[in-house]
Amino acid sequence: KPRIVQLTQATIDTVSCYESVAEESSDVTKIPKNKKTVILIFTVQSLRLVLEKLSSDQIQNLVLVVASHRIKEVAIKYDFKKCIVATEPHDEPMIRAALLEY
């Protein structure tokens, strides 16, 4: 359910505009366990994909650059140690934040 449902008493109808599909070519399991790796996370769904695929050892060495404070809160709940919120949830600010961390 959309987060706005929790913030208001209004009746809200949702309409799916698109179906999100994880790319088959993305293989996050190849991330090294002992090497610093920066991953850009634009959505909670992307974060969950990473969580499903990686071991706790791999998660410990990841640096996440996330698009929002809400995504950071979810990441912290799953023991991500280093999580940076980009200044804006767009490609360029996310990449700038990643380069500063790398």
Image: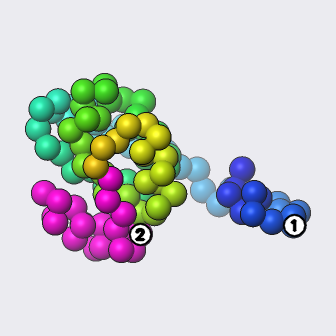
Q: Is residue 27 visible?
A: no
The 10 Å Cα crowd at callout 1, few under 14, some 14 to 19, many 20 or more, is few
Query: What amino acid does circle 1 point to?
Result: Ala
| Occupied quadrant, residue 23 | top left
Q: Secondary structure at mark 1?
A: loop
Tag 2 or tag 1, which sits nearer the N-term? 1
Which residues make up the magenta segment? 83-102
The quadrant of the rendering that contains the C terminus is bottom left
Which residue is nearer to you in this view: 99 or 74? 74
> On residue 89, which mark appears?
2
Q: Residue at x 24, y 42 (%)?
A: 62
Q: Residue at x 51, y 57 (%)?
A: 70
> On residue 54, which mark appears?
none
Q: Residue at x 42, y 30 (%)?
A: 52
Q: Secondary structure at mark 2?
A: loop
Residue position marked by numbered label 1 in the rendering: 10
